[in-house]
Image (tube, grey):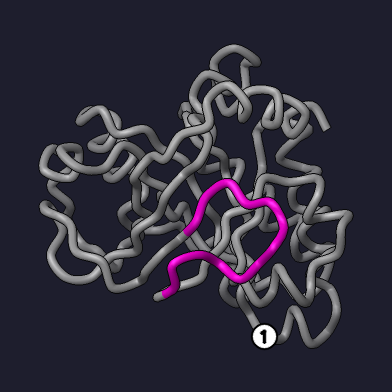
């Protein structure tokens, strides 16, 4: 995989702690200039595959435009409801439509949280199917899931191939012993420029040089 090879190359050079957040329409209208005073990157929800369809996040375009204008680096994510590999492939095509014409300094992620996906044992297969389509279009694709899912459910064909965004709240360090590159630390954060609670993240790689030097994610 072209992108992940460079992740480890650049990770050794750009090993840092960068403060960020992830947002969706639930955060309403965001004052990105205020956010930019403390947060350097944001992962924006592009949409969901609810009921098998293309459900674009109503704030995605606004958040992309205003975050970029404020100097906040951006990534994106798609919340999956796929019930099969074919469903995951459809979600990937929807996601690509919303990414088109944009540039992302952080990875684009497949968010897998539905219990049915894990109980049916399709999580590894849908993750690989989704990311394969994104990679074919020169996007740097990663996977978002909880720490317990990374520890107990995903196998090494996913853990060792894609950049890992892990969610583990209220702890000093995730219990997952594998490699992760972005950590969602809480869902109960507070940030100037956003009314109410918001997810807060740390990134341990400065992804921007990877995207720009290797012409990934719209660059």
At a point 44% along the width and 73% down the height, the residue shown is 171
The x and y percentages for residue 69 are 23, 28
| Vertical arrangement, residue 19 with respect to residue 104, above or below | below
At a point 34% along the width and 59% down the height, the residue shown is 200
Lateral position of residue 145 relative to residue 205, left or right: right
Q: Residues within 10 Å of mark 1 (few under 14, many from 20)?
A: few
| Vertical arrangement, residue 121 with respect to residue 138, above or below | below
The x and y percentages for residue 59 are 31, 54
Dominant secondary structure of the residues highlighted in magenta in the image: loop
At a point 65% along the width and 15% down the height, the residue shown is 214
Lateral position of residue 204 relative to residue 185, left or right: right
Lateral position of residue 195 relative to residue 98, left or right: left
Mark 1 secondary-structure assignment: helix
Answer whether residue 205 is magenta in the image.
no
Corner quadrant of residue 9? top right
Q: Which residues are magenta?
A: 171-183
The x and y percentages for residue 184 are 45, 61
Q: Nearer the viewer, residue 79 or 91?
A: 79
Residue farthest to the top, as pictured: 213
The x and y percentages for residue 66 are 23, 37
Residue under label 1: 115
Q: Nearer the viewer, residue 129 or 162?
A: 162
Answer whether residue 174 is magenta in the image.
yes
Report the quarter where the N terminus lies: top right
At a point 19% along the width and 38% down the height, the residue shown is 36
| Vertical arrangement, residue 110 with respect to residue 43, above or below | below
Report the quarter where the C terminus lies: top right
Residue farthest to the front, as pictured: 172
Lateral position of residue 2 relative to residue 63, left or right: right
């Amino acid at each position: 995989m072209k992108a992940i090879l460079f992740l480890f190359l650049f990770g050794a050079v750009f090993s840092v702690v960068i403060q960020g957040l992830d947002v969706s329409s639930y955060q309403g209208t965001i004052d990105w200039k205020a956010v930019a005073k403390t947060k350097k990157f944001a992962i924006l929800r592009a949409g969901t595959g609810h009921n098998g369809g293309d459900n674009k996040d109503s704030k995605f375009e606004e958040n992309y435009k205003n975050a970029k204008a404020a100097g906040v680096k951006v990534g994106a994510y798609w919340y999956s409801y796929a019930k099969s590999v074919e469903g995951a492939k459809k979600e990937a095509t929807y996601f690509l439509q919303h990414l088109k014409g944009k540039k992302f300094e952080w990875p684009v992620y497949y968010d897998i949280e539905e219990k049915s996906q894990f109980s049916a044992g399709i999580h590894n297969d849908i993750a690989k199917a989704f990311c394969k389509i994104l990679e074919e279009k020169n996007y740097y694709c990663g996977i978002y899931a909880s720490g317990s899912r990374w520890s107990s459910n995903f196998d090494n064909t996913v853990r060792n191939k894609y950049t890992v965004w892990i969610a583990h709240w209220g702890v000093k360090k995730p219990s997952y012993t594998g490699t992760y590159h972005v950590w969602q630390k809480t869902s109960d954060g507070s940030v100037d420029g956003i009314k109410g609670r918001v997810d807060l993240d740390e990134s341990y790689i400065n992804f921007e040089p990877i995207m720009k030097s290797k012409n990934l994610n719209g660059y």
